[in-house]
Amino acid sequence: MALPPEFHDLAKKVNNWGRWGDDDEIGTVNLVTPEVIRRAAACVRTGRTFSLAIPLSLDGPQTGYVPGRINPLRTMVTVNTPFTGDPSEFCTSDDIVVMALQAATHWDSLAHVSYDGRLYNGFPAGSVDASGASRCGIDKISTLVSRGVLLDLALAKGVDRLDGGYALTAGDLDAACELARVRVEPGDIVLLRTGQMQLLKRGDKLAYAAPTPGPSTMTVEWFHDHDVAAVATDSLTFEVFPCERKDALLPVHLLHLVEMGMTQGQNFDLDALAADCAGDGVYEFLLDASPQPFVRGLGSPVNPVAVK
């Protein structure tokens, strides 16, 4: 089934292909300039830090719905093993991990999705093969440090958690900005709290997975017009699910990653940060959310750290 005409009309409005050159592979991360990073550093006032990552374990958010996307499996390979054979000398313990790169708190690379045979900036979908992504892989984003802005959509609605399947609008984003008394500026990383993470913390992975509140196509122009560098949510699907219409599967993914070149983050734990922001009224901070440089990777686990 072909994507509807309305989708293609919106895609033309937010398309960033060629904006940073025909060979560009990082999209809106280009908006994080040295000036933006200096502005972000000025947000540090108290030195309080917040990790926004969920634990890496078999109890992660994956339910098996996405084939092959397994939660982190950690196993021991050595336990107090004498390096020289003499236990009175140096002994070592090591472990290994097998996991999907999108299994926990993570960023998607721009090569993560495609449609009509195209990736971001017009690169062919065939540039992703059994060896990974030769174009737009996550390793192309060497650092991701900028001003973070928390938009607490749940608090702005006066609820602990938005209803599953709630489609966020541009008006919802504006209302959260008004609550935070903050203006989203070019190069910012925007974090969207819907309250969905609370379900995962309660151990209900099925409820956490779907239905899910999140950004809809009604927010895409907002992110484009504000020149947002990257955006992350506290949910598994990132965007609203079930999707807005049956003839467009995960359209926000396609518009953000393919058309705009804006990377998306999922499974960010924003609750402790949100409580602190509500307490002092400060919703901006320095955010270090640099991905791990997996060569040809389609995504990367991340431990984002907000510094206020």
Image (cartoon, rainbow, N blue to C red):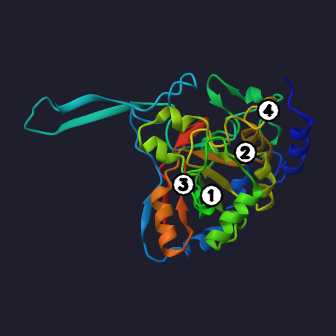
Q: Crowdedness of circle 4 by 10 Å Cα count: few (<14), some, many (20+)? A: some
Say if mark 4 contacts mark 3, CB within 8 Å. no
Tell me the CA gap for discs 2 and 1: 31 Å
Q: Is residue 28 above or below residue 79?
A: below
Say if mark 2 contacts mark 1, CB within 8 Å. no
**Residue 256 appears at what percent x and percent y?**
74, 45
- Mark 2, residue position: 25
Tell me the CA gap for discs 1 and 4: 24 Å
Q: Secondary structure at mark 3?
A: loop
- Mark 3, residue position: 289
Please state if 148 lies on the left or on the right of 98 as rendered. Answer: right
Mark sitting earlier along the chain (1/4): 1
- Mark 4, residue position: 248
In front: mark 3 or mark 2?
Answer: 3
Q: Secondary structure at mark 1?
A: helix
6 or 27, nearer to the observer: 6
Q: Crowdedness of circle 2 by 10 Å Cα count: few (<14), some, many (20+)? A: many
Three-letter code, disc 2: Glu
**Residue 247 appears at what percent x and percent y?**
82, 29
Mark sitting earlier along the chain (2/1): 2
